[in-house]
Amino acid sequence: MIIFDHVGFSYNKRSVLKDTSFLIDYNERVAILGGSGEGKTTILKLILGLLKPDSGRIMVDGEDITIKTESELRDVRMKFSMVFQEGALFDSLNVKENVAFCLREYTKLSEEELDRRVRELLRVVGVEHALDLMPDELSGGMHRRVAIARSLAAFDPAMFLYDEPTSGLDPVNADTICRLIIDLSRDNKGFIIVTHKVYDAMRVAGRFVFLREGTVIFDGNREMLEQATVPEIQIFMRELQAAK
Amino acid sequence: MRIKEIINDLQDYYLLALQGLAGMFTRPFYFRDAIEQMDYAGAGSFPIIILVALFIGMALSLQLSAEFGRLGLKMYTGKAVGITVIREIGPVMAALVFTGRVGAGMASELGSMVLGHQVDSLRVFGVDPVKKLVTPRLISSIIMLPVLTVIGDALSVFGAYYIVVFVSNQSGHLYWQSIRDVLIFENIIAGSVKPFIFGFLIASISCYSGLMTRGGAAGLRKSTTNAVVLSIISIIISDFALTRILLYILGFSV
């Protein structure tokens, strides 16, 4: 369980999150919505301990991660599988080596076993044919799918974290990524997806958190979101109506 | 406020440099990364070092021959070239070339990894970015810069030989005799200690600048520029300090 307890965070003297509080269970499918620069990605980085808040506490499984050292945070990070915006693949490694990165780091698999495991993971995300390609040879959609495969190779996560997984993708690729996100959450594994694409969020998530100026202005399910009267949310919902 | 920032930056730099050094002695070891970096820093810099060292040696020899010729001391050209190249110009020249090519490369590579969230990815996967990225670069610089310096010294001496013999019409035998005379323990130590220090400074400063990159393309430009400028300044200042210390230790009177 993740608890944000009155968390505040600022970057370059600009307040990004203000007194933000919420609670998320590992098996929940949560979408964090909001405009650009509203602190959506910051929330994911705070959960992983990549950033330290200025105020408040962040509890993961009852432990305050804001007071943990970098080496202590390693155990916390292993509970999550993070897919960064645009994939964040290591650009000096090919697809196979990117996916194999954690396997090489944490296992003593033989080259054959490693190859088999990497192919298996790439098959799950549908890009087995890209095994030998370099990241700059991949399309945006393939980039995200390889990043998802790499995150699956890492550990057995309790929860997935997706940072704008469909941004900049055409509808077909965005649909593929959304289906993949739903498939991966079948074993009662939840996820937090950060996006400004309300159509994609509605497809995959069951709970919606809306941020404005670093504050949670909405936290509820699909029906509540559709009936929300907050002007910013209504602007977002227009995109959904247009898509329908 | 600015002073506080500078002190904070210095503190962070020392911490990173120490962590990078400590990473050489603690597991896990990233041998493959270190070899790759050595290939990039060493083999990759070889052609440019050949070119620069050869022409520096020739230019230096021309200057010294012209000046010594006026004083009737042409026969000392070899000795002057040898001492200047081995003790001073060779290490500094190699370090400056290394900064321009390898230091700038390190800063921009790490900077783009920061901006592309690749460094965050490493942290998420439980991998220490300092051990994975900084330590191999420190190792490669500390090993390869001295190697390049020795090669550069040799080529500068050969370049000077060409000028001395074929342009200044002096005796080649006398030139090599002068070079042999300056290849004494004190001169070799004075010239070979410096590249180890310079290599450490270039890699640590460049890695620090790269990892501190913020703010897109403009931030990347700033961190790469900082890496080169700060490395050059630290090379020149530490060269003076090292020269003073080494001359004192090796018993030269000034």
Image (cartoon, grey):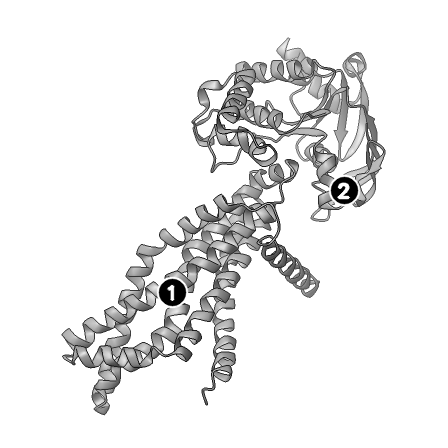
What residue is drawn where x is 71% and y is 39%?
A74
Q: Amino acid at mark 1?
A: Thr
Please name the residue shown 42% across and 61% down the image: B145
Q: Is residue A38 visible?
A: no
The image position of residue B105, as x and y in percent, is 45, 50
Q: Is residue B85 above or below residue B224?
A: below
User: Which residue does the image show at 56% across and 16% down from the upper left?
Assistant: A124
Q: CA distance from mark 2 to mark 1?
A: 48 Å
Q: Mark 1: few, some, or many residues within 10 Å (few <14, many ≥20)?
A: many
Q: Are marks 2 and 1 on the same chain?
A: no
Circle 2 residue: A9
As helix, strand or loop, the secondary structure at mark 2 comes to strand
Circle 2 crowding by C-alpha within 10 Å: few under 14, some 14–19, many from 20:
many
Label 1, on which residue?
Answer: B149
Query: Is A162 situated above or below A49?
Result: above
On the image, the x and y values in percent for residue B175 come to: 22, 79
Callout 1: chain: B
